[in-house]
Image: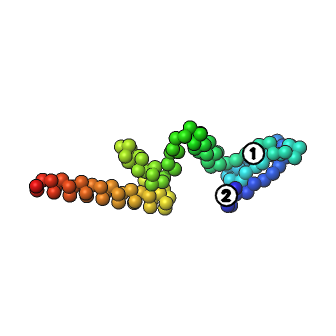
């Protein structure tokens, strides 16, 4: 479990009687609600953020089973480079790590074009 997340274990009866509170706790505070029945974990209620992470994990595991390389993580340097090289627009980063990756990619692009221009100018003089 990630730091700062709280997990609550409750009975199925308690979950049924307080269902809206369970959903609110998961949705708004990010708490994980683990529902037990006769002392056995049966299921859980998680936030939308956890659902997104679970789906991404499922997708990566499915790709790994197929033997293909997983897609780069959204916002990473590799992800931005793949978008750029595919002719797609690279969105503005929203995190400090994304900004750093964006600046690294931008530096690489500028360097590549500078070398191309120098090569053209050198070839034009010859």
Outermost residue to the front: 67
Look at mark 2 in the image and give the residue it sits on: 2
Q: On the rendered structure, is 90 left or right of 125?
A: right
Which structural element holds mark 2?
loop
Front-most of residues 34 and 17: 34
Outermost residue to the right: 38
Residue at 12 percent of width and 53 percent of height: 124
User: Residue 51 placed where, x, y %?
Assistant: 64, 45
Q: On the rendered structure, is 97 left or right of 33?
A: left
Look at mark 1 in the image and give the residue it sits on: 44
Which structural element holds mark 1?
strand
**How packed is label 2: few (under 14 Cα within 10 Å), some, or many (20 or more)?**
few
Q: Residue 4 carries which label?
A: none
Task: Give the answer, above or below, for where 2 lies relative to 60.
Answer: below
Outermost residue to the top: 66
Marks 2,1: beta carbons within 8 A: no
Image quarter hosting the N terminus: bottom right
User: Residue 89 placed where, x, y %?
Assistant: 38, 46
Residue at 24 percent of width and 54 percent of height: 116
Residue at 83 percent of width and 49 percent of height: 10
Image quarter hosting the C terminus: bottom left
Front-most of residues 109 and 35: 109
Q: Which of marks 2 and 1 is nearer the N terminus?
A: 2
Q: How far apart are marks 2 and 1 (CA)?
A: 16 Å
User: Residue 7 placed where, x, y %?
Assistant: 75, 54
**How packed is label 1: few (under 14 Cα within 10 Å), some, or many (20 or more)?**
some
Q: On the rendered structure, is 98 left or right of 21?
A: left
Way the structure is coloured: rainbow
Residue at 50 percent of width and 48 percent of height: 72
Task: Give the answer, above or below, for where 64 lies relative to 109.
Answer: above
Front-most of residues 64 and 16: 64
């Amino acid at each position: 479990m990630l730091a700062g997340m709280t997990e609550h274990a409750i009975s199925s009866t308690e979950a049924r009687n307080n269902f809206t509170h369970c959903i609110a706790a998961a949705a708004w505070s990010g708490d994980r609600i683990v529902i037990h029945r006769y002392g056995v974990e049966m299921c859980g209620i998680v936030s939308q953020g956890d659902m997104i992470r679970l789906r991404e994990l499922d997708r990566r595991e499915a790709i790994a089973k197929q033997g293909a390389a997983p897609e780069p993580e959204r916002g990473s340097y590799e992800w931005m480079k793949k978008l750029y090289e595919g002719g797609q627009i690279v969105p503005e980063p929203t995190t400090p790590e994304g900004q750093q990756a964006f600046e690294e990619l931008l530096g690489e692009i500028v360097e590549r074009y500078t070398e191309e221009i120098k090569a053209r100018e050198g070839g034009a003089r010859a």
